[in-house]
Image: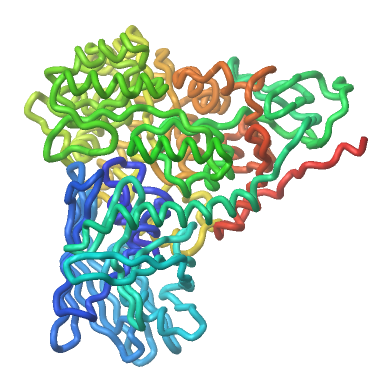
């Protein structure tokens, strides 16, 4: 369901949850939250995040005349939507009239209306409008609706004999029952069912619903982060979460079994041009021998005489080490999209600790398609704005205890977040360094980027956190939306040739501070309603229509052309700043924090726009990423002894960075993937034909 205005609901604590397609999570959370109020005049839901913190509510009121009103509010980490919705139903149980108003997660106005009269459906939102003839049952798919706005579709779907519900403007929704469970609560015991919904977004959506002829949502759970559940039944949420994780795990294991092709013994990759990620050079024709998931040799093409069990004929194509996304927040359904784009390692920059540890174990045990995960420990301070994944602390003793846990569990890096107490920052950084951890993160509220550099940060996340250095003082609370709007509004007037900027870049160089700009993520700062997100603009026609529609919805409040022009100039200067920093010697790593499978490619294109050569941009997602994640000993380059995480391109991204999307083959150790197979399974039109393994014929 193209509801990408509220994708941040799904992981509001971290900006990466704008994505997942982000339409993946837009189409995951709000498409899946199917709640109806047929059983009562008023039905209430509570939204719990990060272990029980209440972050939102939904109140559904059904009036005697059949109209339904919904109030939906969700606030976490200083942001979230506020929506009011009203609708009535036609005789077939689908929307006859519908409207929603309010504000999106980042403050953009939401105003959307739909009507169906005499067989003609008409709709208008802030980003699109249209009309089409409709015969028979079909449900309008709101772009900016509340969880309740999709509830009617769930009930209507249960009444469809063929199990399919056509959607307006397009698409078809289906569902199947995965399992049932008995839960106990204030009204006694009832049975609920776990439903898997498909036809919306790129992956299945799971929702707990009541049983019977008119099911409604009982709970929607994103394991490890969000529990949205009927008020009064909160005690059942953990049990349902555990059951859901097990059920999803079975589906994911089956997907891996179907799409991950075992590579046993030896594999010879013939006649590939190998990218030297350390020096940014492309070789002549080479042969690469892989044995048991490791690189055994790299030699001139035709000179490898050892027999191999399987062969891949590269036919002169370009071979890169597996790409490395330096800023992800890994979910169990991310693996296919990442691997299909050549991403074989992700640095997770903040997650529920137990959930992430389980993900790593499941991936290593072969239960998931998943990039290798390098974990950064998340450390936040106590406040009303706190993001509660990882550890939330209020004093130095608590910070040290958290750091001890991360060190004991093999985390190479710490990420500090917005509400961290500035009074203990320097001592916390020093203690983390004593324990051997790198330190990175956001700039805590009421500080500037220069302050965290002085405190000993090794790395700073996000371009806005860097540029806020020039726009804040000790009274500016950057836990609010100010951290976005200040940068969008003020950067246009910033003199990049002025002494403050030059001195700041010099300080980054002197202190050897790495930057993780996530530029592509911040294109939302200047995207207007109706414009396709730059992340997918060049490849939108490969994506399902609902994803395309959702990616035309803006997230910032840009009220007029003058504001839009200013925000455009601001974003251009954000890009230019990264180019100047790189030219001065500041190390850059390529991270996304947005739609998996598509954002890293746009990030690298922006680096080229900033002034890097394509080869230098590729280094940020290979050599640099592995070096600063402290895993360069076994990945990040194509060298003997390293993991055989390799990507073959049907094009030359060292000459044209756009070719980074033309992934023809991916090897992750002892498993091969054909991106076209994964994309087809997810409803994406493939980019290039696969290059397939062949038996050696020996």
Q: Is residue 206 above or below residue 352?
A: below
Question: Residue 529: x, y in percent?
Answer: 31, 57
Quadrant of the frame with the N terminus = bottom left
Question: Residue 474: x, y in percent?
Answer: 8, 24
Give 308 or 232, whichever is nearer the viewer.
Answer: 232
Q: Residue at x 46, y 70 (%)?
A: 177
The image quadrant of residue 297 is: top right
Q: Is residue 361 above or below residue 414?
A: below
The image quadrant of residue 673 is: top right
Quadrant of the frame with the C terminus = top right
Question: Residue 227: x, y in percent?
Answer: 27, 54
Q: Residue at x 38, y 34 (%)?
A: 518
Q: Is residue 596 above or below residue 447?
A: below
Can residue 123 be seen in this snapshot?
Answer: no
Q: Is residue 410 left or right of residue 110?
A: right
Q: Residue at x 25, y 77 (%)?
A: 98
Tell me the colour scheme of the image.
rainbow
Q: Is residue 302 above or below residue 339?
A: above
Q: Is residue 592 left or right of residue 385?
A: right
Q: Is residue 275 left or right of residue 512?
A: right
Count of all numbered marks drawn on residues in the image: 0
Give 239 or 572, whichever is nearer the viewer.
Answer: 239
Question: Residue 2: x, y in percent?
Answer: 38, 62
The image quadrant of residue 285 is: top right
Residue sticking out furthest to the left: 475
Q: Is residue 549 left or right of residue 187?
A: right
């Amino acid at each position: 369901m193209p509801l990408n205005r509220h994708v941040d609901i799904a992981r509001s604590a971290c900006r990466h949850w704008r994505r997942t397609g982000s339409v993946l999570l837009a189409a995951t959370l709000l498409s899946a939250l199917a709640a109806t109020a047929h059983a009562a005049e008023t039905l209430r839901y509570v939204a719990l995040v990060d272990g029980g913190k209440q972050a939102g509510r939904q109140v559904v009121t059904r009036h005697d005349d059949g109209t339904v009103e919904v109030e939906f509010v969700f606030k976490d980490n200083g942001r979230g939507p506020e929506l009011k919705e009203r609708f009535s139903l036609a005789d077939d149980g689908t929307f006859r009239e519908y409207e929603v108003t309010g504000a999106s997660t980042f403050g953009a106005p939401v105003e959307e209306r739909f009507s169906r009269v005499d067989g003609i459906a008409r709709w208008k939102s802030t980003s699109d409008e249209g009309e089409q003839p409709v015969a028979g049952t079909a449900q309008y798919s709101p772009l900016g609706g509340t969880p309740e706005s999709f509830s009617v579709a769930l009930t209507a779907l249960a009444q469809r004999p063929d199990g399919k519900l056509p959607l307006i403007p397009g698409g078809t929704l289906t569902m199947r029952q995965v399992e049932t469970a008995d839960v106990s609560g204030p009204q006694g015991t009832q049975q609920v069912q776990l439903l898997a919904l498909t036809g919306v977004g790129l992956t299945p959506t799971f929702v707990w619903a009541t049983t019977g002829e008119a099911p409604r949502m009982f709970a929607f759970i994103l394991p490890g982060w969000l529990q949205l559940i009927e008020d009064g039944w909160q005690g059942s949420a953990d049990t349902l979460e555990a059951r859901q994780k097990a059920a999803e795990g079975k589906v994911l294991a089956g997907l891996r079994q179907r799409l991950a092709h075992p590579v046993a013994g030896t594999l010879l990759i013939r006649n590939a041009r190998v990218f030297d990620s350390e020096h940014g050079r492309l070789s002549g024709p080479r042969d690469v021998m892989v044995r048991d998931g490791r690189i055994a040799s790299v030699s001139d093409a035709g000179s490898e005489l050892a027999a191999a069990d399987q062969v891949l004929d590269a036919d002169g194509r370009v071979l890169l080490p597996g790409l490395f996304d330096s800023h992800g927040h890994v979910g169990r359904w991310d693996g296919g999209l990442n691997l299909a784009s050549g991403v074989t390692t992700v640095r997770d920059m903040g997650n529920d600790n137990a959930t992430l540890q389980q993900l790593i174990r499941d991936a290593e045990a072969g239960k998931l398609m998943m990039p290798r995960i390098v974990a950064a420990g998340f450390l936040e301070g106590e406040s009303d704005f706190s993001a509660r994944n990882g550890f939330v602390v209020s004093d130095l003793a608590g910070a040290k205890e958290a750091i001890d846990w991360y060190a004991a569990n093999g985390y190479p890096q710490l990420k500090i977040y917005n509400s961290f107490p500035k009074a203990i920052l320097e001592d916390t950084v020093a203690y983390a360094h004593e324990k051997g951890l790198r330190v990175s993160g956001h700039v805590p509220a009421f500080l500037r980027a220069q302050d965290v550099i002085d405190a000993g940060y090794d790395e700073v996340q996000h371009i806005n956190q860097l540029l806020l250095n020039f726009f804040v003082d000790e009274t500016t609370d950057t836990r609010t939306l100010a951290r976005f709007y200040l940068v969008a509004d003020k950067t246009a007037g910033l003199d990049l040739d002025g002494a403050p900027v030059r001195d700041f870049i010099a300080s980054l160089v002197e202190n050897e501070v790495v930057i993780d700009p996530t530029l592509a993520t911040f294109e939302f700062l200047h995207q207007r309603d109706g414009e396709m997100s730059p992340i997918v603009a060049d490849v939108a026609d490969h994506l399902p229509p609902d994803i395309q529609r959702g990616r035309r919805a803006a997230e910032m409040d840009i009220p007029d052309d003058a504001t839009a022009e200013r925000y455009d100039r601001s974003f251009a200067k954000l890009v230019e700043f990264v180019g100047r920093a790189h030219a001065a010697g500041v190390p850059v790593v390529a991270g996304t924090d947005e739609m998996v499978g598509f954002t890293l490619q746009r990030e690298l294109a922006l680096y080229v726009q900033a002034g890097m050569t394509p080869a230098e941009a590729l280094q940020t997602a290979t050599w640099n990423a592995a070096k600063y994640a402290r895993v360069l000993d076994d990945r990040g380059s194509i060298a003997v002894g390293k993991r055989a995480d390799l990507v073959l391109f049907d094009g030359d991204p060292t000459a044209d960075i756009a070719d980074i999307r033309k992934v023809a083959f991916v090897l992750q150790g002892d498993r091969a993937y054909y991106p076209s197979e994964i994309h087809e399974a997810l409803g994406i039109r493939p980019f290039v034909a696969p290059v397939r393994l062949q038996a050696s014929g020996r």
